[in-house]
Amino acid sequence: MKKSVFFGALAATTVLAGSAFAGTLDDVKARGELICGANVGLTGFGAPDATGAYVGFDVDLCKAIAAAVLGDASKVKYVPTTGETRFTALASGEVDVLIRNSTWTFSRDTDLKFDFVAVNYYDGQGFMVKKELGVSSAKELDGATVCIQTGTTTELNLADFFKSNNISYTPVTVGDDSEALRQYDAGACDAYTTDASGLAASRASLANPADHIILPEIISKEPLGPVVRHGDNNWGDIVRWTYYALLEAEEKGITKANIDTVGTSTTDPEVKRLLGLEGDMGAMMGLDKEWAKRAIAASGNYGEIFETNIGTSTPIGLARGLNALWTQGGLQYAPPFR
């Protein structure tokens, strides 16, 4: 009797799980296009290139999801969003997923009813100033004017930092990174504060990057990652595990160039599961067997995407730091594919 009840419950659970595939996944498939909430323009992370096509670290995750779900990394529509408009765009259904340097916080996760499915960049808030200001520490910014984006975690962090150090400042509020950089470069503020990665990206786009310094203080934790709406757990799983597939590929030495060769020669059971050569993990999310293979092939593994867009060989010049794999002293870590 107990056995039959167990299997009856299991069958009911399977039916419910199958119905859970409905929602965003079905919408994306029916539309034939992923709508990705993007940045207005943050060099290296998400910004239009000279042809108007979106490129960057966050953009490549959008492409990976499109490849996993639709079989084509180009089937993405990018909707530019600001710090103030991004969450409204996601909540209203204007975008399927938000991938644009957004910080995972308690209130955003609970009060705004969103799910941050992973951390694709571990960051922290910093300050940039012009060398001519003669400042070597953020604690020397007493009385400074500071450019800051509205609708971001940086506003409260900034207030807390100055209050705890018993110094004052005057905020110069801006709508997005592009406006912040224009105001800062024009001298409307003494300092610009945002995520340290954003400061590096902004500095790289200035006429004379060497004339600007990023101060040593990191005043907050800013775990950045892709965001989906509460209530569509299957879609959250797809975004989450697509990202983890990129991480796992780096750890296993799978690149955009060698993915087919690895597939024909590997004896690693986890690699076989990842590439759809054994088992059928895709079916658990309403996808086919090669979803992860296509995601990796779109722009490469996590390390490739990092180095291509924001790494030390780019003008932005970011070291991996906390975003190195766990095997290399960092925090990036994919749960097991089993």
Image (cartoon, rainbow, N blue to C red):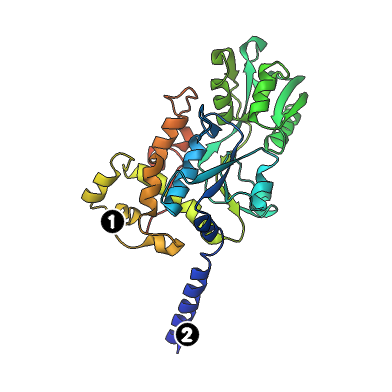
Q: Note whether 261 is above or below 28 in the view shown.
A: above
- At 53% from the left edge and 34% from the top edge, which residue is drawn? 45
Q: As drawn, is 291 to the left or to the right of 102?
A: left
Q: Tag 2, which secondary structure?
A: helix
| Residue 322 drawn at (x, y percent) | 48, 36
Circle 1 packing at 10 Å, graded few (<14), some (14-19), many (20+), is few
- At 69% from the left edge and 42% from the top edge, which residue is drawn? 85
Can you tell which mark lies on residue 15? none
Q: Amino acid at mark 1?
A: Pro
Residue closer to the observer: 273 or 176: 176
Q: Which residue is mark 1?
A: 269
Quadrant of res 99: top right
Q: As drawn, is 102 to the left or to the right of 26?
A: right
- At 34% from the left edge and 40% from the top edge, which residue is drawn? 256
Q: Which residue is mark 2?
A: 5
Quadrant of res 217: top right
* Proximity of marks 1 and 2: CB atoms separated by less than 8 Å: no
Going from N to C along the chain, the mark reached first, 1 or 2, is 2
Gap in angstroms between the C-alphas marked 1 and 2? 34 Å
Q: Note whether 76 is above or below 315 in the view shown.
A: below
Residue closer to the observer: 288 or 325: 288
Which quadrant: the N terminus?
bottom left
Q: Tag 1, which secondary structure?
A: helix
Quadrant of res 297: top left
| Residue 262 drawn at (x, y percent) | 26, 46
| Residue 156 drawn at (x, y percent) | 72, 36
Q: Note whether 226 is above or below 192 in the view shown.
A: below
Q: Amino acid at mark 2?
A: Val
